[in-house]
Image (cartoon, grey):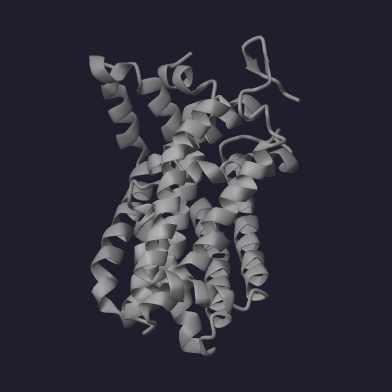
Amino acid sequence: MSEIETITSAPKSKSLLKRMIPGLILGFLVLVALSLVGDLKQVGELLIHFNWWMFPLALCFTLFNYSLRFLKWHFYLRQIGIRTIPWQRSLRLFVAGFPLAVTPGKAGEVFKAVWLKHYGGVSVGRGVSVVVAERVSDGLAVLMLSILGVIAYPQYWLAFAIILAVLLGAIILSQIRPAALWLLALGEHIPIFCRYVHDLREFYEGSFAVFRPGTTLIAVGMGTVSWLGEGIGFYFLLLGLGIQPSSHLLALAIFILAFSTIVGSVTALPGGLGASEASIAGMLVYLAGLDAPLAAAATLLIRLATLWFGVALGLFTWTFSADLLGLQEENGTYSKS
């Protein structure tokens, strides 16, 4: 067994929960800070008078996002050669991964690759390529949704261009196969790296498959539509706070949520906590002209309807997924039940 697989082959529930604790604490502190910055009393009053019929509607758009992202996940599994996992089990693996987003740097998501190893028969390195592809395609998708906003507000252009260049650069480099194979062969002769070359080779083979031009276009297209759904959900939450409907507000809601997702993704903070909230609230004040309490209330609502809704779905999935948490083992491996 390789070094990486030795480290990650038994993701116990205690190990997963331990990795989540910093994110959960940070999430609580962020919610408290938002309420205090926006004036706790005023934020509370805004939430009391919020049209709560809009919240289930926003959750429906979040579920729309998750549904398309699941189809993209399952599509990626086929690209790396996993064809034996039925869609029901694939869905369970996908949803069970939601809480892992609140681990530092989202490092906990490597456990999704471990689950793929046990249920799909692929190496952890190849499974990690799917996790990375999800993040990259989501990043490109929200960048596509941000284009019009960046044109309207050029102060965000530099950050947009840098992130786009990094994501596209990673995809292009993954497709220059001779150079990648040469570097891997070179690594076999370097003592420090030789022990990791097998895992890196598996990761590269998976990356080469999932980042092929046609595959990437399909994945980014699906991601763009799915994240557009969350932007529309954010718009309805703003309406529920009493803001007058308009096409300009709809465009702003989509841009603000997309760009804040980018901001949160490029940080190593669990779930982008703190960075995403500050970005959403700040742009609501600066671009939409909302006052601080209203911006804070809107930020609280959208994060509850997206990030924390997903974490709740994932934790619920854990209640009937003891096999994923390492609680059911047979002869040192996961039970296939």
Instruction: Look at the image and tell me whether residue 122 can be seen.
Output: no
Tell me residue 313's x, y (percent): 64, 49
Name the residue located 53 percent from the left edge and 27 percent from the top edge. 14
Name the residue located 49 percent from the left edge and 38 percent from the top edge. 109
Quadrant assignment for the C terminus: top right
Tell me residue 217's x, y (percent): 50, 58
Q: Is residue 254 above or below residue 177?
A: below
Tell me residue 20's x, y (percent): 47, 38
Tell me residue 63's x, y (percent): 65, 60
Instruction: Look at the image and tell me whether residue 278 can be seen.
Output: yes
Name the residue located 74 percent from the left edge and 42 percent from the top edge. 88
Name the residue located 62 percent from the left edge and 12 percent from the top edge. 332
Q: Is residue 151 above or below residue 19?
A: below
Q: Is residue 72 above or below residue 323?
A: below
Q: Is residue 213 above or below residue 10?
A: below
Q: Residue furthest top?
A: 331
Q: In this figure, what is the number of numbered marks?
A: 0
- Depth check: give the residue in front, 287 or 265: 287
Q: Dividing the picture into quarters, in which one does residue 274 lie?
A: bottom left
Q: Would you say 251 lies left or right of 178 here?
A: right
Q: Would you say 250 lies left or right of 261 here?
A: right
Q: Would you say 121 lies left or right of 195 here?
A: right
Q: Dividing the picture into quarters, in which one does residue 151 lie?
A: bottom left
